[in-house]
Amino acid sequence: MSTYNDNLRSTVLTALQSQSLDQKKLESQKNAAMFTLYHAEGATITADEKLDAAKGDVDFKAKVKRQAVNNTNIANNLVASATQADQYTKQSVTNMATCASNVQIAAKSILRLASDVGSIFSIINASDSGTEMYKSAENVRNLINNTAYSAQLASDVAMEASMLTSEVSSSALLDNSKAANSLINNLLKLTSANFDAASQIAAAANTELATASATTKLAEGNLEDLAIDYCAAKVAYSSMNSHLNLNLNVAKVTQTSFDVDFNLIEKAFKADRDGLPQPKNPTVMVQDYFLIVVKDNKKATLSVSNAEE
């Protein structure tokens, strides 16, 4: 009987120890999986924040690039207009100089004609004063004098127009337009490079988020599997402890005390009035128990016989 009890106790102890070790192992794995999931979720959140920041940066730099493109188009059109204006201005200067020269030549010719007409009028005035020829010569002289005066004014206007035309700074405008266009083109290159860099960062952040999300999902699945296994191990240990070990539980452990809870043992027989044993009916529980506390490193040598002794 003692050997049977020892074997039974050893078997129960071994089964409970094995189940307890499995439970502790699964609990450790579950905790590790929980921390892994925690870090994976943290990485996912960080990757998501990086992606949001990268998208915001890309949107901002895209707007800057579009503005730079518009400015570049305007600068290119300005250079084209300034080039055409410079060409037309140079042509106008040449044409106006030629016009002023021709007007001056014509004015000089009219002045010489007016001088000749004046001389003729002087001769007629001396010889035929008061005649019909005199009146005609006087009228011609007045007309030629007015014409000479107008020719002189036209010559002055032509010279002033030539001077003003030559003062138009189309060359300086063209040079400034080219310089501005060069600066804006450099700005466009810079904004394009910044946009491309931001796009690459956003793409990398998107890839990082996808990887982190996949890792998080894997960690979630692993934690769920381990949680199920751990719950199954707890239920198995509880069931095994309940059926094989009187549902023994130790709680409120301190440095000096602890509480022990277990199922009471039914008495196999009940004594009647005459003191003769009878089959149990109704059920009667054993009320008195002895508890032996053994160090963990000594539990392997403890036997029912030793406990009884």
Image (tube, helix red, strand yellow):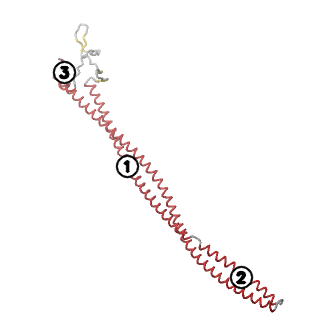
The tag earlier along the polypeptide, 1 or 3, is 1
Q: Which image quarter holds the C terminus?
A: top left
Q: In which quarter of the view is residue 255 placed?
A: top left
Q: Is residue 289 above or below residue 167?
A: above
Give me the disc on residue 208. Answer: 1
Residue nearest the observer in this picture, 146 or 78: 146
- Residue pictured at 50% horizontal, 65% vertical: 179
Mark 2 surroundings: few (<14), some (14-19) or many (≥20) residues within 10 A: many
Q: Which image quarter holds the N terminus?
A: top left
Q: Amino acid at mark 1?
A: Glu
Q: Amino acid at mark 2?
A: Ala
Residue nearest the observer in this picture, 232 or 268: 232
Q: Is residue 36 above or below residue 127?
A: above
Q: Say whether marks 2 and 1 touch (CB < 8 Å).
A: no
| Mark 2 to mark 1 CA distance (whole Å) | 91 Å
Q: Which percent across, then down, holds residue 100?
A: 63, 79
Q: Say whether marks 2 and 3 touch (CB < 8 Å).
A: no
Give me the disc on residue 304. Answer: 3
The secondary structure type at the circle numbered 1 is: helix
Q: Which percent across, then down, holds residue 215?
A: 35, 45
Q: In which quarter of the view is residue 2 placed?
A: top left
- Residue pictured at 64% horizontal, 77% vertical: 159
| Mark 2 to mark 3 CA distance (whole Å) | 152 Å
The tag earlier along the polypeptide, 2 or 1, is 2
Mark 3 surroundings: few (<14), some (14-19) or many (≥20) residues within 10 A: some
Identify the residue position indicated by label 2 in the image: 148
Q: Which percent across, then down, holds residue 251?
A: 31, 24
| Mark 1 to mark 3 CA distance (whole Å) | 62 Å
Q: Amino acid at mark 3?
A: Val
Q: Is residue 96 above or below residue 38?
A: below
- Residue pictured at 46% horizontal, 62% vertical: 186
The secondary structure type at the circle numbered 3 is: helix
